[in-house]
Amino acid sequence: MLSDVTTPQDLDDRFRETLAALPAAQRRRDPADPVTDDAPLTGAQALDLFDAQVTSRQLDLAGRWLRSFGEGFYTIGSAGHEGNAAVAAALRPTDPALLHYRSGAFYCQRAAQAAAEATPADQAQPADQAQPAASTQPGTSTQPPAGTRPGTGTQPVVDPQRAVDPGPAAELEAADQSEPSEPSGTEPPTGGFAAYADAARDVLRGMVASSQEPIAGGRHKVFGRADLAIVPTTSTIASHLPRAVGMGLAVERLRRLDSAGRRTGAGVRVGSGAGAAHAPWPPDAIVVCSFGDASVNHASATAAFNTAGWYDHGKLRIPVLFVCEDNGLGISVRSPEGWVEATLRAKPGIRYFSADGTDPVQTYAVAAEAAAWVRRTRRPAVLHLRTVRLMGHAGADAESAYRSSPELAEDLDRDPVAATARLLVDAGVATGEELLARYDETGWQVRRLAEEVLGEPKLASAADVVSALAPRRPMRVARAVADAAARASGSGAGARAEAFGGKPPELSGPMTLAQSINAALADGMLDHPQMAIFGEDVAAKGGVYGVTKGLRDRFGAARVFDTLLDETSVLGLGLGAGLAGMLPVPEIQYLAYLHNAEDQLRGEAATMRFFSQGAFRNPMVVRVAGLAYQEGFGGHFHNDNSVAVLRDVPGLVVAVPARPDDAAPMLRTCLASAAVDGSVCVFLEPIALYHTRDLYADGDGEWLAGYPEPGAWVAGHVPIGRARVYRVGSADDLTIITFGNGVRMSLRAAAVLAEEGVGTRVVDLRWLAPLPVADIIRESSATGRVLVVDETRRSGGVGEGVIAALVDAGYVGAARRVAAVDSFVPLGPAARHVLVSAEAITDGARTLLAR
């Protein structure tokens, strides 16, 4: 009897009742035949879908069971969404997929597809490789071509238990590989749980936070595995959709480059040096990205759809299949009737497909048609899959507060697993009794695996938790810089001379900060064939401050291009491109604009290695023009001094070059770290210093610097997390710790103090994350007096981190801060009242020295 909320017992009881009531067909059908006369699915394929759906259903039930005694930590299930198994079947196991949290059946089906990759070619042809679903020939299989290796080009995480102790599942698999007998009226069909055992174990390990879970290692319950080309995402509100668009853009670009490489005999190189790799997915791969109906309203989804359509309108192809699984609810909030369809149909440049997700034949047919269309045209499409939601949003969800019993009963009547069972019984492929036996066997096996993974270890320490966060291999990064220098002065010298018009930057005389960054970007483009620079106004205009001027002319519009005005999409393009094997360098025009899209860095970029144990990475160097002190142009949007959101992101590298002779080596370090370690770096460029030439007096040229020739790159290498120290006078009396604009102001203040007989050490942090703690402690202890000059705000500013580092290290000397006021930066001369000045630094130093 249905209660006020659909419980696991309700769901199980109703399913059993449904199967028991199904009348047997008059004759048995050969599983090799179409499940109905005009269906694109064979009986065997429909039975595979049923097994994937049942495995997913039993995993949901197991999750609730584990939670009932405090051993399960995740209960958002897939019940009601199991129709997405047919979507997986219509795709290839090498199509990269970003899945939302109700994708259990998709995951199980994809795992079974990949496991069957060695099937002989004459028995293996993906649905969309043959013909669109409307004309798909009966008997078409969904298996990949023989020899096709699923995955993303990365090494899959090895599951120790699978490697040494496959357990009883191996016996089941061995039994399933025995010679099948001819179907008869009494013998059950072949197949069963064995093909899904590994996938089930993966999901269960995620539920219990086992450290042996193969993708996140117990850090979160996600659907992901490198060898299945499933990219883990923790998103629940569409923040992964912009990444999917970026992946589609990169896949198509790499496909074109790969085709050109095959014609010329050259390969597609990702990065540089010995670690160069080829494109991670097949040239004709498409990207699939699933999400819920409530997510269509989220800004991230709107940005992704708009970007895909914008590029399609401009004839730039993006092969992405969006899959909206519409159960009509966002937890308790209903999607208005017809709203999702109207919204998706209205997206320009995105073709609309629709199917009933509780009908396996229709879902498979439409999904195959949609996938074939995207693969053939290389254009974006959306599949609107209508589903139901069973057992509520999660374990603690009391549906009775917002849904009626008749509504719950209506959803139960549309149970997709029961619908697949009816299809099989009506077709004569199996009887209800046989399917119930498969259901019970799967349930027993899932419960056995659940009990098995309960004993597996959890993450045991903070070191275990953060081990996959953001590896730092400074020696390899230094070697990458050295290799780049060797190429620039050796085999690549001719190309470099041509790119710079015969006059390399080291011969151009002293440079400004902007000019130095421009030259370093050009050198980076020469050394990293997969590097691309993009953002608002970076190509034709060369950036609003001229920092990227001339780069499009040198390297072409495919590598230096303008984007639409949307920071979420700019970063999403970078995330997808990095995951696909490129080295993206997106620009955010102003620091204030980054706040529109900061979750793309926090929730997507920085978490990728963390939730995949390094199996996936999204290398990226995000250039951001920021900080204050622009003269004659201002307001808080163009003089933003808020960096707290960046320093709070675990694993993120934040670089702030103050001088031109630091900018180039720091940028080379960031590019090398991204290529070697997959780092996500933010290169924060002080706008007010872009074109600064003088330090102490007009015309002194002290803020200019020459660009080093490649032979000097190694000696001038700047490792991540190392400061620069300037010594003024005796340098024994005072240590000033600062960064960005503060460096120039502090050097001016130090010159004034020197006239008063005070020797100063000015420490340029250069890196705000990770902070150069060792340098901070050493230089502070040398004088015993520390003045922290922080051009960001007093609350949440960089200075707090510096002071905390001193306290943590047991520093016992005197310390004082000079920081900006907790205020937005106003327009015009009023800004001087809230920002740090050289005079304020001098006064702060005198106060500290007087103690």
Image: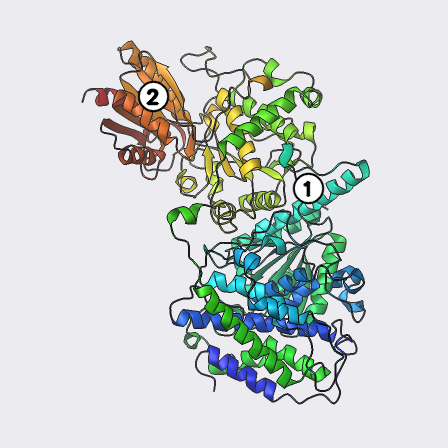
The amino acid pointed to by label 1 is His
Q: Quadrant of residue 120?
A: bottom right
Q: Nearer the viewer, mark 2 or mark 1?
A: 1
Q: Which residue is mark 2?
A: 838
Which residue is nearer to you in this view: 465 or 335?
A: 465
Q: How is the image coloured?
A: rainbow
Whether residue 646 is visible to the viewer of this picture, yes or no, is yes
Left or right: 783 in relation to 660: left
Q: What secondary structure is found at the residue carrying circle 2?
A: helix
Q: Quadrant of the C terminus?
A: top left
Q: Disc number at residue 745?
A: none
Which residue is nearer to you in this view: 153 or 646?
A: 153
Left or right: 568 in relation to 268: left
Q: CA distance from mark 2 to mark 1?
A: 52 Å
Q: Quadrant of residue 629?
A: top left
**Number of numbered discs:** 2
In the rendered view, would you say 538 is above or below 287? above
Mark positioned earlier in the residue sequence (2 or 1): 1
The x, y position of residue 742, in whole percent, is 38, 25
Residue at 56% across / 84% down in the picture?
Answer: 16
Q: What secondary structure is found at the residue carrying circle 1?
A: loop
Left or right: 270 in relation to 468: right
The x, y position of residue 760, in whole percent, is 31, 17
Q: Residues within 10 Å of mark 2 (few under 14, many from 20)?
A: some
Which residue is nearer to you in this view: 102 or 840?
A: 102
Q: Quadrant of residue 499?
A: top right
Q: Which residue is mark 1?
A: 278
Residue at 56% across / 52% down in the picture?
Answer: 157
In the rendered view, would you say 280 is above or below 33? above
In the rendered view, would you say 825 is above or below 187? above
The amino acid pointed to by label 2 is Ala
